Image (cartoon, rainbow, N blue to C red):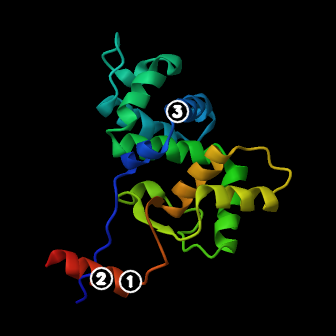
Amino acid sequence: MDDKKIAFVPFNALDRFMRPDYRLNVIRTTLHELPGLPKNYRAAIDRATKKTVKVPGFRNSEKAPAAVKVIPMANAFEKSPDLVASVISAWVESHQELKLQVYDLLIKRHWEILPIEADRTKLPGFLPYWPKGEEFEVLYQAYTEMYTQADTGMDNVSLMVVWLSGRLPFQEEEAETDETLTDKTAEDDK
């Protein structure tokens, strides 16, 4: 039996790539859109909130009004992979058109990604490998050329790329095969 290992970084590593104002905006937008999303998104956020977010004046943080929860939730964002996964998953669900556009963009650029309907919250985190030459600026440029009528900023496109690809740009490299990853893991284990 082959013993193949792939390294993941936890979902909360995303915090390193987000400006504080943008993180607050994503959380605020997500909490605002939550009532219109399927119940499983709210349940996941409520569970993660109850477990990791402390809102002053509330014994049960999930019962706090959205406006009061935003900052404590942003503070917990850097520490809780479950909170990050549930918030970003709901954010993605509330941006369906952008989701479809970015998915098409990544497929056309030959990224190997999960099917669009896959539940990425079930993954252990993000892959730390990023395709060489695919910086956020390059991807945003390609997005704006492909969707000339789209009216969304680079931050939103970049976050969607990260979530749909399941990757964070910790290491930029050529696409690796499973054998290459196994060889590297075997060398690391020595």
Tell me the quadrant of the picture where the N terminus can be found: bottom left
- The residue lying at 69 percent from left, 55 percent from top is 140
Label 3 belongs to which residue? 27
Left or right of residue 103, residue 171 in this image? left
Measure how far apart labels 3 and 2 are at the Cα level.
37 Å
The reply to whether the C-beta atoms of the residues labelled 3 and 2 are less than 8 Å apart is no
Kindly give the residue lying farthest to the right in the view shown.
149
Q: Position of residue 136 (x, y in %)?
A: 60, 56
Which residue lies under the disc numbered 2? Answer: 182
Badge nearest the viewer, 3 or 1: 1
Quadrant of the image occupied by residue 73: top left
Where is residue 151 drawn, in percent x and y? 79, 44
Under tag 1, what secondary structure?
A: helix
Give the residue type that dot 2 points to: Thr
Pair 3/2: label in front: 2
The image quadrant that residue 48 belongs to is: top left
Q: Quadrant of the C terminus?
A: bottom left
Circle 1 is placed at which residue position?
178
Q: Which amino acid does the dot numbered 3 rest on?
A: Ile
Q: Secondary structure at mark 3?
A: helix
The amino acid type of the residue labelled 1 equals Asp
